[in-house]
Image (tube, rainbow, N blue to C red):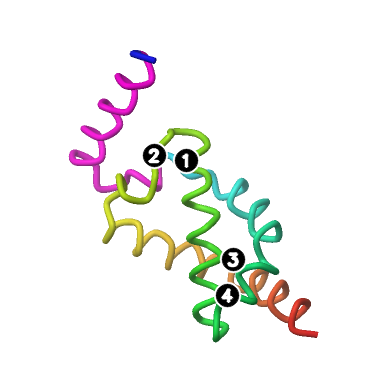
Amino acid sequence: MKLQQSIRRILKEELLNESKFFHRRVDLDKVQKLLPINAEQVYYETESYKQFKYELTLRAVEAIMWNEYGLGWEELPEQEEIEFVNKVSDIFEKYIKLLYNNIKR
């Protein structure tokens, strides 16, 4: 357990020192694979396509951060996460729109 605590401490220190924390740690291929897994649930929890797009991408990014680094949303830099999620959701705009439209039918 001490190893995990040390890793978390180091990652938290890096969070404070890095402006590209998410860019270095979140593999976009993994994000794309996670999007369809959560799409239906997020669709029914959101009220617009814009909200769906953001929430779906956010869920994928936070799943990666938790599964690979053991970091929950409360431990992540909020503003940087928002900016990163918006950029990634724009990258996958066509794919997310396809998921949205398939569920909407």
Q: How far apart are marks 4 and 3 (CA)?
A: 20 Å
Which residue position holds label 3? Answer: 92
User: What crowding class fits label 4: few (fewer than 14 Cα within 10 Å), some (14-19), or many (20 or more)?
Assistant: few
Q: Which amino acid does label 3 sit on?
A: Phe
User: Is tag 2's residue or tag 1's residue first in the polypeptide sequence?
Assistant: 1
User: Is tag 2's residue or tag 4's residue first in the polypeptide sequence?
Assistant: 4
User: Is tag 3's residue or tag 2's residue first in the polypeptide sequence?
Assistant: 2
Q: Which amino acid does label 1 sit on?
A: Trp
Which residue position holds label 2? Answer: 71
In percent of the image, x 19 and y 41: which residue is there?
16
- Helix, strand or loop under label 3: loop
Residue 40: name its quadrant.
Answer: bottom right
Instruction: Tell me whether circle 2 and circle 4 mark residues in contact (CB < 8 Å).
Output: no
User: Is tag 4's residue or tag 3's residue first in the polypeptide sequence?
Assistant: 4
**Residue 26, disc:** none
Does the magenta run of residues contain 27? Answer: no
User: What crowding class fits label 1: few (fewer than 14 Cα within 10 Å), some (14-19), or many (20 or more)?
Assistant: few
Which residue position holds label 1? Answer: 66
Please give the range of residues in magenta.
Answer: 3-24
In percent of the image, x 55 and y 54: which residue is there?
60
In percent of the image, x 33 and y 43: which residue is there?
21
Which-is-in-front pick, marks 3 and 2? 2
Which-is-in-front pick, marks 4 and 1? 4
Which-is-in-front pick, marks 2 and 4? 4
Q: Distance between the residues labelled 1 and 3?
A: 21 Å
Which residue position holds label 4? Answer: 45
